Every structure is written in C-alpha cells, then in structure tokens.
Image: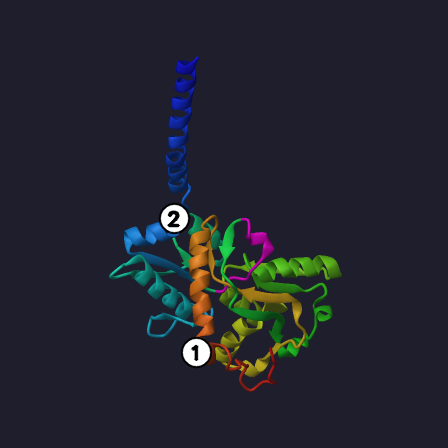
Amino acid sequence: MKKLFNLKLKHLLNALMLIPLIMVSHHLSAQPTSVTLEHIKSSSTLNIGYRQLEPFSFRDSDGKVTGYTIALCNMVADELRESLGIKKLAIHYIPILFTERVSALNTSKIDLDCSVNTVAPERKNSVSFSTDYFVANMRIVSLRKNNIKSLNDLRGRTIAVPRGSKDLLELNRINREKNLSLSIVTSDTVEDAFDMMTQKRTAALILDDILVYPYINKSEHPENFFVSHEVVGVKMKYALMMRKEDPIFVDFVDKTLGKIFESPLNAQLANRWLTQKVVAKNTQKTQY
C-alpha cells in the first residue's frame, strides 16, 4: 500500500512540475504577431497607397507625393524605422483607386492606405481604420447656371459620384429615404466625376467639400461653379486604412498618430494643409 501511495505521489509531483513548462510554452505560442510589422521588417520596405486628392495625398508638379496624410504616414514610417531597428526603410508610394483599397491591403500590395478613407461601418468587416484625423461635409457641386442649391433641386436628375466611396453609400441611402429618383453615375476617380459635371453629362456632383475646391480653383472659370450651403448626409470622418486582423499594427499606428496630434507639429501640418480655408476663386465663399 505504501509503495502504491509513493508511486502515485511521484506521478503527481512529476505532473505538477510539468505545469509551469506547459504554461510557458502556451504563453510563447500565444504571443500575438503582426503580419504587417514582420513584412516591413523583413523587407525594409513600407508600401503606401494614395490617390490624387488634394490636400491629403497627391503627386505635385515636381513628381513628389505629398499632402497632409502623406506627412502623417511619413512620420509613422520614421517611428517604424526606429522601433524595428531598420537602418534604411524604403517607402514606395503606390496609386490605388477607391475600389482597389481593400484588395490592395489584403494581398499585401500596400501596407497602409494614406489617402482619403472615410470610416464606414460597412467596411469594418474587411479593413481596419486608425483614429480619425479630419471631418468633412458632403455637399452638392454644380454649374451655377443650373441653379441647384438643395437636394430637392436634384429630384429626378443625374448625379456623379466616385464609385467605392462613402459618398456613394450615403447618397444611395438618401436617395431611397427621400424618394429623390436620382440617376447615379459612378466614376473611378474624383476627377472623372468632376469632369462629368463640368461637361454637363450629369447635373451635379456629390462630394466632400474640402476635396472639390482644388478642382474648381484649377478650372478656367471657377466663378461658374456653385457649392451648396446645404450639407448632404452624415459627416465624413477620415482615417488611415489598414489590413483586418492585425491589431498590433493598428495600435502602433494609433499610438504614433496620438503623439503627433498632441505635439506642436500637428498644428503646423494642419495650418499648412487644412485650416487655411480652401474656397472657390471669385465666388461666394462657402464655409465648411
């Protein structure tokens, strides 16, 4: 009986001794990893998606990709370089259409989309968003002679809007709820949507206010355009877009943005790109 008791005790002690090892092994295997951070570190490369959308991301006349969100992402790159111990981090700026953003992220064509991305519940199953950095209003843009000032003036008419954008989702909702009978024509880019309106292929364009003024100001006759005082739909919160299921990278980006937003540097960036009112030349000023 004593031998049997000692044998059982021995087995129990051996089992107890294994518990810490099992716990350590489980802890190590359960350590979360970031696919994005691992890719950036192993390749010493950060691939940034952007679109031609002033003042947030655009290629200027000298061929340099610049803008407010590009500046933010360049500072994220600096933080990555230091945190990952990369001596030289190459940054590749890759033009990506609205409709390509999700697939470009999920196929690792880009690591971070640094253009205008509106936070939308419909997208959160496919991608992750950073903390928002700007809030815009959607407005009606038209030729002044069309005398379009409100949604009611658009009833039964043809409207241009970029496909794959939150503007399109919001316009579809408003069209259904208000029974406006709009005919919505979509385009690959904001510029194409703007051209449809200027070439009278559509009666108007629905777009975020801050994005439309650069196109008006570059036109030959900016005084010919009208931007509605009426705000259409909900406010548009802009954020950086990242791959889904990579919370460590999202947290890294958010913490970096938090540091930027709390520093005097952000005021300088905002003053350069955002707080100077962008208004159509020679027209009645429309406040955001």
Which of these two is toward me, 53 or 132? 132
- Residue 282 versus residue 207 in the image, above or below: below
Question: What amino acid is found at the position of numbered circle 1 in the picture?
Answer: Pro
Q: Is residue 21 left or right of residue 175?
A: left
Rate crowding at label 1 as few (under 14), some (14 to 19) or many (20 or more) other CA atoms within 10 Å: few
Q: Are marks 1 and 2 in contact (CB under 8 Å)?
A: no
Can residue 58 be seen here? The reply is no
Is residue 170 one of those drawn in magenta? no
Q: CA distance from mark 1 to mark 2?
A: 32 Å
Chief secondary structure of the magenta portion: loop
Horizontally, residue 117 falls left or right of residue 235, namely left
Q: Which mark is residue 264?
A: 1
The residue type indicated by label 2 comes to Val
Residue matched to label 2: 35
Residue 180 place in picture, x, y as percent = 73, 62
Q: Nearer the viewer, mark 1 or mark 2?
A: 1
Residue closer to the observer: 253 or 218: 253
Residue 82 against residue 31 in the figure, above or below: below
Query: Is residue 216 in view from this perspective?
Result: yes
**Part of the protein shown in magenta:** 116-125
Q: Earlier in the sequence, mark 1 or mark 2?
A: 2
User: Local crowd at mark 2 within 10 Å, few (<14), some, or many (≥20)?
Assistant: some
What is the x, y in percent for residue 85? Answer: 28, 59
In this rendering, the answer to whether 284 lies above or below 212 is below
Along the line of sight, the residue nearer the viewer: 97 or 83: 83
Q: Residue furthest left?
A: 87
Where residue 2 appears, as percent x and y from the top left, is 42, 15
Q: Nearer the viewer, residue 47 or 158?
A: 47
Write the residue at 42% across / 65% down.
256
Mark 1, secondary structure of its residue: helix
Task: Tell me which corner region of the image, top left, top right, bottom left or bottom right, holds residue 3.
Answer: top left
